[in-house]
Image (cartoon, rainbow, N blue to C red):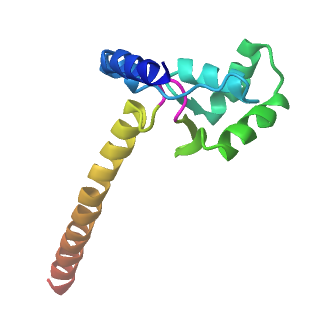
Amino acid sequence: MIRFSHLLLASLLAGLPGWAAAQAVTPTDHPGFVLAEAIAVQGCSLHQDDVNALLGDLGLEPPQFPQMAVPLMRDGYLMPGGEGRLQLVNWGLCIGDEPDEAENGGAAAATAPAATDAQPDDEAQPDDETTEAATE
């Protein structure tokens, strides 16, 4: 009977759509559950400037934020995302690199080396012109 249940479960899971299989576990008894769910609704990312407004919407006070955020960070669900953002990962539909982070980080990373490479050439040209002007 147990073997039959495992086979039945495996066949049911095989028929699920891809998005259902990609959903992470959501521990409802986690101390940061309320905060994590609110961040998930906002696209899995929260800017530090939006923390107080989010807490107000939830009917919570600012001192309650660390009581929820620290356990989420400790357990690997909430991570710094750069530019003052907190990123929710491995929670519900927040399974990792979110589109906002990939687009912003990827675009910045892709343009930064090109801009850095272009600057030394730009700096060399004014120095050459200055040298030519000084010799005339």
Quarter of the rendering containing residue 101: top left
Quarter of the rendering containing residue 55: top right
Where is residue 38? Give x, y as percent. 63, 20
| Number of numbered discs | 0
Where is residue 98? Give x, y as percent. 41, 33
Where is residue 60? Give x, y as percent. 81, 19
Residue 39 relative to residue 95: left or right:
right
Quarter of the rendering containing residue 129: bottom left
Residue in the image at 22% along x and 62% along y: 118
Q: Nearer the viewer, residue 83 or 22?
A: 22
* As drawn, 39 above or below 96: above
In the picture, the quarter occupied by the C terminus is bottom left
Decide whether the magenta segment is chiefly helix, strand or loop. Answer: loop
Q: Which residue is outermost to the bottom?
A: 135
Residue in the image at 59% along x and 33% along y: 47
Residue 48 relative to residue 29: left or right:
left
Residue in the image at 65% along x and 26% along y: 27
- Magenta part of the protein: which range? 90-94
Q: Nearer the viewer, residue 63 or 79?
A: 79
Residue 104 relative to residue 126: left or right:
right
Residue in the image at 39% along x and 24% along y: 21
Residue 9 relative to residue 115: left or right:
right
* As drawn, 92 above or below 111: above
Magenta stretch: includes residue 91: yes
Where is residue 46? Give x, y as percent. 58, 30
* As drawn, 129 above or below 49: below
Q: Nearer the viewer, residue 97 or 121?
A: 97
Q: Which residue is outermost to the front?
A: 1
